[in-house]
Amino acid sequence: MAPALILVLGVMLLLALLLGGLALAHGGSGRVLRERVRNLAGTQPAASATALPSIRVGGATHGGLSLRLFRLIRYNPDIPQEQIIGWPVVVAASLGAGAGGGWVAAGPLGPVLGFVAAPLCAVLAARLIFGWQHGRYCDAVFQQLPDALGLMIRAIRAGLPLAEALRSISREMPSPSKEEYARVVGDMAIGRPVDAALVRLHERTGLTEYAFLAVTLGLQSQTGGSLAETLENLAEMVRKRVAMAKRAKALAGEAKAQAGLLVILPFVAALAMSFIQPFYIEAFLSPTGQTMAMTGLGLMLLGLLTMRWLIRRAGRD
């Protein structure tokens, strides 16, 4: 009972850490900001007090500990719309994975290693879920980038200013580009330059193409020239990059299929061996066999993650 109690206490400690960090992200900075606005509103005239709440502050600040925790589990509090799975569900699933992984590892490896494996499994599960959601969101923004640039070029050639062209994207484009460009327009409305607003978009999504767009607009505002022609050249390059990314994803399908076969093949072989020569499988029921099985599963998981990283790296290059 003592090892199980230690394992439960470790999982509960991890739960408190995750919930505290995420609660800080959702409530801490907003509460401080509301208090400052309320205090400022109390010292200003009535007209100013009514105008203050309409100012929307887009970038919340977090402490160093919470930022390190978010970076560890790949949670981005600046893009709440990317979370198709609520963070309480992700935390619950991660804790379940941590408890299950710790309980499985505590048998053959001992309670100490089981206690170490529990938080590792929980963090890995949260990182996989949050990372999958962030990658899915950024890929959707990346696929819509050529259409957004095309709409911007048509609006500028029709005689609209750049700010109105960006505002038309926030109205006409589907999600998630609609929300991202709405944030860009909001940043410009409070006095931030367009290149700085697009740099913030690049920092949120991690897409290099938005860094290109920010640099292009910044240089064009300083040197002058035809904005529509400049954006047309950039849009042509972005279309080629999107097409190349799709081709790389198609070529990576073969490598993913091979990785899946390499993972499934040992289990298929073990199932066949259990029917042909059962005593080979019975050897894994002993404590030594369970330790060997857990070691093999760990090495298989490490190999799978390595292949996944190599495939993503090749596709990114």
Image (cartoon, rainbow, N blue to C red):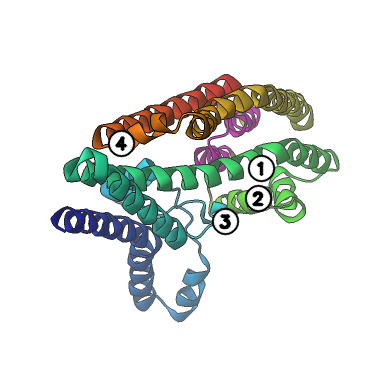
Q: Which residue is mark 1?
A: 140
Q: CA distance from mark 1 to mark 4?
A: 43 Å
Q: CA distance from mark 4 to mark 3?
A: 38 Å
Tell me the tag on residue 84: 3
Left or right position of 24 against 246: left
Residue 98 in magenta? no
Residue name at image x 35 percent, y 51 percent: 100
Whether residue 74 can be seen here: no
Q: Amino acid at mark 1?
A: Ala
Q: Indicate which disc, 1 or 4, sits on the residue closer to the N terminus.
A: 1
Q: Secondary structure at mark 1?
A: helix
Residue 293, x across and y down, in percent: 35, 32
Q: Is residue 244 above or below residue 155?
A: above
- The front one of 75 and 145 is 75
Tell me the tag on residue 303: none
Q: CA distance from mark 2 to mark 3?
A: 12 Å
Determine contact: label 2, label 1, CB under 8 Å: yes
Q: Amino acid at mark 3?
A: Ile
Which of labels 4 and 3 is toward the front?
4
Q: Amino acid at mark 2?
A: Pro
Determine contact: label 1, label 4, CB under 8 Å: no
Q: Determine the main secondary structure of the stretch shown in magenta.
A: helix
Tell me the tag on residue 176: 2
Q: Secondary structure at mark 3?
A: loop
Q: CA distance from mark 2 to mark 1?
A: 7 Å
Q: Which residues are magenta?
A: 195-220
